[in-house]
Image (tube, coloured by chain):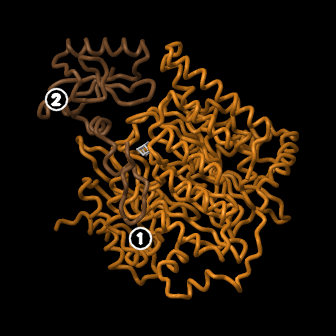
């Protein structure tokens, strides 16, 4: 698995992300298994912990729970891991507000309920 | 419109059954992702930034009202209530679940649609002039030829695993509205001196990291020889295309490396050696079979003498008049018009449409456009057959749904790819930048003062937003962990096709709208008179005034 992180000096750890096979949703490996909440992701703080997470992720690929897992460098933001790389931040926190809209007239963009 | 015959229907049904089985095997673990990926891509299913994405083919941009209504149903039932029309006249759904996709494909098949060959290294959806069959300047309707090419290229055993994806566009008008010069193969329909149908053949166009305009390698090939000639091109490409390097694998690189003359020589040699008279006979017969599907609808005679449109336009109805002059075009019948539906409201997402809007347009098309809709490469829709007498009603109806913004061909008619909000390959966001520019220039009077202007943007070097051929192009990149937007100027699609030039270093997300504003102000302040368009001005004075405006120290 390739590390997508950048700016290595600021990283405080690594989490593992993937897409759920059945529906493609972005998920993170946490203590209780795969979760859609990044706040519940397990942060590996050294190489050994990271390798252990990667081994678990590979197992989940075999059991068809997730697809394409990879590690992401994160920094701590008030107790919540936040990815360092721009792409990973958008993958996790995007799409941005208003970008899923159609348009309902009257000049206002309308967010389609999720 | 073309209707599937039994063979078409059987082919699509069989592919869905096979894909359903592949999905089941994938979910059970009998297929790994490596094995499954080529199958899912062949059926238009990508794994994007947040979820799977399904790209549905809209052959040559032609949709029926029934099909559009079905897309609305799919958007609501399986996605988040909207779809995104792309620069290749297709539609994308951003959130389908893998487990649902076989069902979605079944529902598409019921209305004769599919997602086959919307991905992968094969011949993709054939694109076409969105005004085909109705444009006042049309030489001949290109759609029967597009349909012929669709059938020929579908599941073509020899051309399913090309070195890279392969895009073909066909134009049938005196003006090129299909951007043929930015395609792997661009075809322009022409008649010879005896009135026989044939094509000018252009090869090796494309954008991406190496933008190149296609070169003409044949001034005219008779229509019946088209398939033999295209086969020759694809064989030369299949044989010598750079499979060793993904970034050099498109046919444009082969044409460039061999040189146009040598490429032409090889194609002609292949064509002469492989020409099959029976293919020419088959082409003639098949075109004769297909052509009636594209016969003009049964237009009722709507004489201009009783034209309520003229009455409304003459009346003090400024909003309608604006829309009439900007969003409608000349139809081959004087009592009809081509209506462009803008999917670019101020602050909207270019190309997005809600299910409710799709249903409204479907109903409108049934009532006022003989049930037909077109999708344009500029991410708008077209009602191709509107009686002028119905124009006021059509405008009023579109307006209730936010679909009557009179900005076609103007600054806020922005083309933008999904960018980093959705796309796994993106390096920067496009949609919010397009929204911000759309809002900044929402004032229509100002847009009309600026005049015709094409602004297009892409969220990475792959250039799906066609920024290279925009008058003002914006490319979103990542620089040291931040988004950086590079401006190109002077590109153009269509007849005067040109690749734009990068103006200088990029701008941060919070600076890019102001930078566009400075480009516009430079033009407005210095143009000779309002008749000098942005592109004319740029071609007259060059890039320096814009560089000064953007980069000179304050
Ligand atoms: S240009 Fe890049 S970001 Fe935009 S859709 Fe294409 S691949 Fe994605």
What residue is drawn where x is 54% and y is 48%?
B72
Instruction: Tell which of B427 and A80 is nearer to you.
Output: A80
Measured from the top left, where is residue B294 in percent x and y? 76, 56
What residue is drawn where x is 20% and y is 12%?
A48
Is B61 left or right of B397, judged from the image as shown? right
Chain drawn in orange = B
What residue is drawn where x is 48% and y is 58%?
B469
Measured from the top left, where is residue B59 in percent x and y? 65, 47
Instruction: Tell me if the residue at label 1 has its CB under 8 Å from ligand 1.
Output: no
Query: Few, some or many C-alpha atoms within 10 Å of disc 1 (few <14, some 14-19, many ≥20)?
Result: some
**Quarter in which the C terminus of chain B is drawn:** bottom left
Q: Mark 2 lies on which chain?
A: A
Q: Mark 1 lies on which chain?
A: B
Mark 1 — residue? B538
Gap between marks 2 and 1, in whole Å? 46 Å
Q: What element carries label 2?
A: loop
- State the mark number for residue B225: none
Measured from the top left, where is residue B31 in percent x and y? 53, 16
What residue is drawn where x is 83% and y is 46%?
B286
The vertical placement of B432 against B39, above or below, is below
Q: In which quarter of the image is residue B278?
A: top right
Q: What element carries label 1?
A: helix
Instruction: Tell which of B416 and B344 is nearer to you.
Output: B344
Mark 2 or 1, closer to the camera: 2
Instruction: Tell which of B62 and B525 is nearer to you.
Output: B62
Mark 2 — residue? A11
Instruction: Tell which of B31 and B398 is nearer to you.
Output: B398
Do residues under tags 2 and 1 come within 8 Å of each other at their CB atoms?
A: no
Task: Give the farthest residue toward the left.
Answer: A78
Measured from the top left, where is residue B495 in percent x and y? 59, 64
Chain drawn in brown = A
Q: Quadrant of residue B327?
A: bottom right
């Amino acid at each position: 698995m390739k590390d997508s992180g950048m700016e290595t000096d600021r990283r405080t750890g690594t989490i593992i992300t993937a897409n759920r096979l059945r529906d493609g949703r972005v998920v993170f490996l946490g203590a209780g298994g795969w979760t859609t909440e990044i706040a519940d992701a397990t942060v590996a703080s050294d190489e050994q912990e990271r390798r252990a997470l990667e081994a678990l992720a590979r197992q989940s690929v075999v059991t068809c729970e997730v697809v394409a897992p990879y590690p992401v460098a994160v920094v701590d933001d008030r107790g919540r891991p936040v990815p360092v790389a721009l792409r990973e931040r958008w993958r996790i926190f995007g799409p941005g507000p208003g970008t899923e809209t159609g348009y309902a007239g009257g000049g206002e963009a309308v967010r389609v309920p999720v | 419109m073309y209707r599937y015959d039994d063979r078409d229907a059987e082919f699509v049904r069989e592919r869905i059954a096979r894909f359903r089985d592949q999905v089941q095997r994938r979910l059970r673990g009998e297929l790994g992702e490596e094995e499954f990926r080529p199958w899912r891509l062949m059926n238009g299913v990508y794994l994007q930034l947040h979820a799977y994405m399904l790209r549905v083919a809209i052959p040559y941009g032609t949709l029926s009202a029934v099909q559009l209504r079905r897309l609305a149903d799919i958007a609501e039932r399986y996605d988040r209530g909207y779809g995104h029309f792309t620069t290749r006249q297709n539609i994308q759904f951003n959130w389908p679940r893998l487990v649902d996709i076989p069902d979605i494909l079944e529902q598409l098949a019921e209305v004769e649609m599919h997602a086959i060959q919307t991905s992968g290294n094969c011949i993709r959806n054939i694109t076409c002039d969105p005004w085909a069959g109705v444009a006042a300047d049309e030489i001949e309707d290109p759609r029967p030829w597009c349909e012929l090419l669709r059938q020929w290229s579908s599941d073509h055993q020899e051309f399913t695993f090309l070195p890279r994806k392969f895009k073909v566009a066909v134009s049938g008008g005196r003006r090129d509205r299909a951007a043929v010069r930015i395609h792997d193969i661009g075809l322009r329909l022409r008649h010879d001196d005896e009135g026989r149908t044939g094509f000018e053949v252009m090869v090796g166009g494309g954008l991406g990291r190496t933008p190149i305009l296609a070169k003409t390698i044949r001034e005219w090939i008779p229509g019946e020889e088209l398939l033999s000639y295209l086969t020759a091109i694809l064989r030369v490409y299949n044989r010598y295309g750079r499979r060793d390097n993904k970034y050099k694998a498109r046919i444009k690189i082969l044409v460039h490396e061999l040189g146009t003359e040598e490429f032409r020589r090889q194609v002609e040699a292949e064509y002469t050696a492989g020409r099959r008279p029976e293919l020419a006979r088959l082409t003639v017969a098949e075109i004769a079979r297909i052509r009636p599907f594209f016969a003009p609808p049964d237009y009722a005679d709507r004489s201009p003498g009783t034209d309520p449109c003229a009455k409304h336009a003459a009346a003090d109805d400024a909003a309608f008049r604006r829309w009439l002059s900007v969003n409608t075009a000349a139809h081959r019948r004087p009592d009809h018009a081509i209506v462009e539906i803008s999917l670019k409201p101020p602050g909207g997402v270019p190309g997005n449409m809600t299910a409710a809007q799709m249903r409204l347009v479907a109903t409108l098309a049934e009532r006022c456009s003989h049930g037909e809709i077109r999708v344009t490469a500029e991410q708008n829709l077209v009602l191709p057959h509107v009686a002028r007498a119905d124009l006021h009603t059509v405008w009023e109806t579109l307006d209730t749904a936010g679909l009557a913004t009179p900005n076609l061909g103007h600054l806020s008619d922005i083309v933008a790819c999904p960018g980093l909000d959705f796309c796994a390959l993106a390096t920067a966001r496009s949609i919010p930048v397009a929204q911000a520019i759309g809002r900044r220039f929402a004032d229509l009077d100002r847009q009309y003062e600026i005049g015709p202007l094409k602004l297009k943007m892409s969220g990475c070097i792959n250039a799906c937003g066609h920024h290279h051929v925009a008058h003002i192009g914006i490319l979103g990149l990542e620089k040291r962990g931040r988004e950086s937007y590079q401006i190109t100027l002077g590109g153009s699609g269509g007849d005067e096709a040109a690749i734009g030039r990068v103006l200088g270093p990029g701008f941060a997300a919070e600076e890019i709208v102001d930078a566009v504003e400075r480009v516009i102000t430079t033009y407005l302040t210095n143009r000779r008179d309002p008749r000098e368009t942005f592109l004319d001005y740029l071609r007259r004075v060059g890039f320096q005034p814009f560089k000064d405006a953007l980069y000179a120290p304050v």
